[in-house]
Image (cartoon, rainbow, N blue to C red):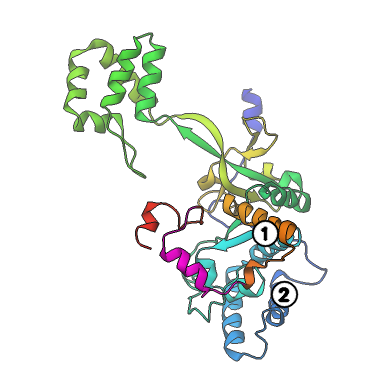
Amino acid sequence: ARAIADRCHVELTLEKFVFPDFPLPQGKSADEILRELCLKGLKARGLEGRPEVLERLEYELGIIKFKGYAAYFLVVEDLIRFATENNIYTNIRGSVAGSMTTYLLQITKIDPLEYKIPFERFLNPERPSAPDIDMDFADNRRDEVIEYARRKYGDDHVAQIGTFGTMMARAAVRDVARALGHAYSTGDRIAKLIPMGSQGFPMTIDKALELEPDLKVIYDEDDDARETIDFAKRIEGCVRHVGVHAAGVVISPTPLTEWTPLQPDPKGTGKTITQYDMYSVGEDGVGLTKFDFLGIKNLAILSDAIARVKETRGIDIDIETIPIDDEKTYRMLAKGDTEGVFQLNGSGMTRWL
């Protein structure tokens, strides 16, 4: 084993963005293809002959070329086009709505000039970060898009991102108490005295000992409790299980094994996942670009509803042509009748409608 280790030499280039090797026509660069697609999009969007649109487009393409991000936009455009051509409902949210480039590529559906949305919120020339376009797909067909990416770039170039669940304070106490053979009540009593943390600020055992007097008392007076807590502090924060990121997928220019260790999904789904988490595999680590393939149930519901209307009433509905000032829609929203409406359901939203 030592001889093998001595022969191994690995150098990792960190914090440098790496994009997929998007197939290009011979003699064409990614920037040239991106420009051609955008110019075609002018006609498709009915924006030909508008100097302010061309000015905005040239500005954005200049930044994209300077940053070296053209391949990223081509990859996303290709994925969205595949979904659209195969009737997979999709949507794009977030700051990318400020891009004229993505609007002309049919990635986004909002004219940023009409709504005065700045491009820099999405891609700032002064900020050293990769573009981030979250792609929403109907959750019952999301895997079809990931499979398309595997076919296009190679199965050994595409993987979902692994996640690592860590041992939190309460779970550590319960597991240690059980492993030490203490009564169930011992671990349960200690765990219930540990306050709940808040999002982004998990509770630790040391902090709980400072905040909760009763916990400090049993630590000082109960030998079993003290033994349990001391061991629990040693395993707190350790990785407990491996999972799969809900949306993150990486696509590499060369085989993924040159960038990250891999493993099968522990649930036995047959998926390949990275053994680096989203930070280590992404821009803070080896630099692979993360593509977010989000599965959205509401898009599947919309797709099914439109299909049912077609089947039962013979009516073709194009949701993209529904006017944004539709009176019936606003009456529904004003009544708080938003159960099942994406991001508008729940008391937190309906109370203000």
- The amino acid sitting under disc 1 is Ile
Q: Residues within 10 Å of mark 1 (few under 14, many from 20)?
A: some
Q: Is residue 131 among the parts visible in the rendering?
A: no
- In percent of width and height, residue 153 lies at 75, 52
What range is drawn magenta here? 322-339
Disc 2 is placed on an element classified as: helix
In front: mark 2 or mark 1?
1
> Image height check: is 205 above or below 317?
above
Numbered label attached to residue 37: 2
Between residue 305 and residue 176, name the one nearer to us. Answer: 305
Name the residue located 70 percent from the left edge and 53 percent from the top edge.
253
> Image height check: is 343 above or below 52?
above
Between residue 29 and residue 295, name the one nearer to us. Answer: 295
- In percent of width and height, residue 150 lies at 74, 48
Disc 1 is placed on an element classified as: helix
Q: Residues within 10 Å of mark 2 (few under 14, many from 20)?
A: some
Work out whether mark 2 precedes mark 1 in sequence or the reverse, and give the earlier one. 2
Asked if residue 215 lies left or right of residue 246, the reply is left
- The amino acid sitting under disc 2 is Leu
**Looking at the rendering, in which quadrant would you find the C terminus?**
bottom left
- In percent of width and height, residue 167 lies at 42, 29
Name the residue located 57 percent from the left edge and 88 percent from the top edge.
52
The residue singled out by tag 1 in the image is 306
